[in-house]
């Protein structure tokens, strides 16, 4: 599992959107103050192409909580496809941990990764402990019967009416059954994802 020492420091460098916990008004105000201070300070490093590419690569890596080797492998395979950005997005979104998070079964990707690693999540009724397992259209993601009382899922049913997270169109969710069905595939849109995959490919093609 990718260890993250300081989400606050990383989010200040890469952007609040990469972590759920930094998407807050308090963090936004802190960012605004930091930006103002930077504008008023002298000097500073220029925005080189390499720096821009590295920053975007890190944003993708920390958003999905994966290692450098994992992202590099995903990018290498995706680059062989007709639509590299779309292929990379599918590979990242359709990981078991990311799909469980997207379905609203877990509050964060980190929690989803932990749930999968500990065997709390099932795919088509079978327990999986591999967060990188790729789900496919027709698969059903569920919470293992013996894990439903785990603190990881505390309040999931009770708070379902308050859950305002948008579920992507490639998933359908039935919280009464604590499961989600994969009914399609995610499509890549720079505006919606907030991630610039072409810049990531620029980094790896150096």
Image (tube, grey):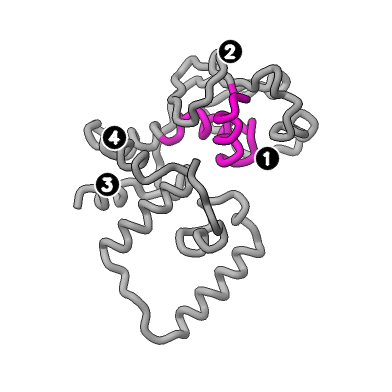
Start-end of magenta stretch:
92-121
Q: Earlier in the sequence, mark 3 or mark 4?
A: 4
User: For mark 1, does the 10 Å Cα neighbourhood hold few (<14), some (14 to 19), or many (20 or more) residues?
Assistant: few
User: For mark 2, does the 10 Å Cα neighbourhood hold few (<14), some (14 to 19), or many (20 or more) residues?
Assistant: some
Give the mark toward the camera: 4 or 2.
2
Name the foreground residue: 58 vs 197: 58
CA–CA distance between discs 2 and 1? 27 Å
Residue marked by disc 2: 125
Question: In the rendering, at what x and y percent does residue 112 appear?
Answer: 58, 35
Residue marked by disc 1: 164
| SS at badge 1 | loop
User: With respect to residue 141, does 7 lie above or below?
Assistant: below
11 left or right of 22? Answer: left
| Tag 3 near tag 2, CB within 8 Å | no
Residue 47 counted in the magenta span: no
| Tag 3 near tag 1, CB within 8 Å | no
CA–CA distance between discs 4 and 2? 29 Å
Residue marked by disc 3: 201
Q: Earlier in the sequence, mark 2 or mark 1?
A: 2
What residue do we see at 57% from left, 61% from top? Answer: 8
27 left or right of 136? Answer: right
Q: Main secondary structure of the magenta part?
A: helix
């Amino acid at each position: 599992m990718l260890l993250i020492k300081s989400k606050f420091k990383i989010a200040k460098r890469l952007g609040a959107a990469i972590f759920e916990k930094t998407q807050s008004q308090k963090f936004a105000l802190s960012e605004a103050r930091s930006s103002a201070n930077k504008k008023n300070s002298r000097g500073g490093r220029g925005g080189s192409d390499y720096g821009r590419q590295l920053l975007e690569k890190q944003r993708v890596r920390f958003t999905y909580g994966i290692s450098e080797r994992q992202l590099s492998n995903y990018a290498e395979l995706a680059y062989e496809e007709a639509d590299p950005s779309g292929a990379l997005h599918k590979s990242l979104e359709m990981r078991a941990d990311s799909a469980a998070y997207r379905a609203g079964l877990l509050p964060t990707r980190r929690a989803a990764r932990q749930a999968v690693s500990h065997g709390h999540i099932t795919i088509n009724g079978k327990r999986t402990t591999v967060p990188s397992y790729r789900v496919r259209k027709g698969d059903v993601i569920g919470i293992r019967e013996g894990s439903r009382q785990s603190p990881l899922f505390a309040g999931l049913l009770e708070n379902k009416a308050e859950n305002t997270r948008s579920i992507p169109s490639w998933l359908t969710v039935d919280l009464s059954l604590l499961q989600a069905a994969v009914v399609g595939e995610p499509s890549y849109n720079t505006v919606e994802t907030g991630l610039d995959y072409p810049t990531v490919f620029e980094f790896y093609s150096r």
